[in-house]
Image (spheres, grey):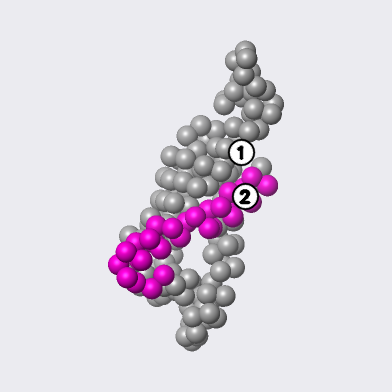
Amino acid sequence: MDRVALKAGLVGAVVSGAPSTVWTLLEGGDVTEGGRALGKVLLPREERTWVLLAAGAPVHGALSLGWAYVLAAVLPERGEMVAGAVGGLGIAALDLAVLGRFFGPIAALPQGRQWADHVAFGLSVGLVLRKSRHARDRDRGEGRAGRPAAAGRA
């Protein structure tokens, strides 16, 4: 499951910014805002965008991988996408509503976008897990819940 969680985390890290990016573009805002905020948590006196983005990127990646490993361990074998989206809401509650309050740059971000990004993260992790589990079951000749596949299917 380690390789699957790694893949899910990488996909989630890339996909999770889509809602806020689209939302921000539609409003004509600054798409680097979230990345700069995360960098600002690490480097509070820094103002250069490229430095803040460079500082925030590995943190975002590490958080995405960590949460993907958690989701891979706890999401059920069925309904991974829905459970992943719900998991993304739970992660948002912790990241944004609880911990984010203590970090000014994170608290200052438009919260609706950030919550949408977290749901997209959980949903994408759930999708990767579902696809990987389905492929695993197919390779073993099992159905979705570990039962033997029906005759004529493999």
Q: Position of residue 40 (x, y in %)?
A: 48, 78
The residue where tag 1 is placed is: 132
- Which residue matches tag 2? 7
Question: Is disc 1 surrounded by few (<14), some (14 to 19) or many (20+) residues within 10 Å?
Answer: some
Which quadrant is home to the N terminus?
top right
Magenta region, mostly helix, strand or loop?
helix
Residue 46 or 70: which is nearer the viewer? Answer: 46
Residue extending farthest top: 151
Label 1 with label 2: CB-CB less than 8 Å = yes
> Range of the magenta residues?
3-31
Q: Is 15 inside the magenta-drawn segment?
A: yes
Residue at 60% x, 35% y is: 133
Query: Quick check: can you spot residue 38?
Result: yes
Residue 140 left/right relative to 20 = right
Q: Is residue 87 visible?
A: no
Q: Position of residue 65 (x, y in %)?
A: 59, 56
What residue type is disc 2 on? Lys
Q: 29 or 65, which is in the foreground? A: 29
Residue 4, above or below 77: below
Q: Give the residue at x 56% y 43%.
A: 128
Element carrying mark 1: helix
